[in-house]
Image (cartoon, helix red, strand yellow):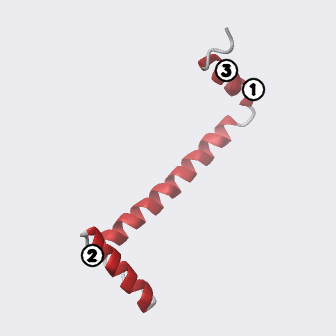
Amino acid sequence: MTALTIRLPEDKYERLKTLAKRRGISVNAQLNELIALLLSDHDTEIRFALHQKRGRGKSRRGLALLRQAAGKDR
């Protein structure tokens, strides 16, 4: 595990501390959750971009499959 020092304005730190206390977790745990969400969002964006790149030029086929799945191509 790595230790990290961050600089925050005092008012933000106090708000963060209050929120952590209200949630019943430590500031460290709260920041860890936030970082996990941020990384998950980033990973999702990367995966979406890869899928988008792979699907370029295939929109007609994709729309046809959606119509078929919705039962509109029968």
Which residue bears the numbered disc 2?
21
Q: Earlier in the sequence, mark 1 or mark 2?
A: 2
Residue at 43%, 84% in the rendered image: 12
Of marks 1 and 3, the one in the foreground: 3
Relative vertical location of residue 67 with respect to residue 22 in this rendering, above or below: above
Q: Which residue type carries mark 2? A: Lys
Q: CA distance from mark 1 to mark 2?
A: 53 Å
Do the residues under discs 3 and 2 have CB atoms within 8 angstroms?
Answer: no
Q: Which residue type carries mark 1? A: Arg
Identify the image quadrant of residue 11.
Answer: bottom left
Which residue bears the numbered disc 1?
60
Residue at 36%, 71% in the rendered image: 31
25 and 57: which one is in front?
25
42 and 70: which one is in front?
70
Q: CA distance from mark 3 to mark 2?
A: 50 Å
Which residue bears the numbered disc 3?
67
Identify the image quadrant of residue 24.
Answer: bottom left
Q: Earlier in the sequence, mark 3 or mark 2?
A: 2
- Is residue 23 toward the left or the right of residue 61 in the image? left
Percent of width and height locating residue 68: 64, 17
Q: Which residue type carries mark 3? A: Arg
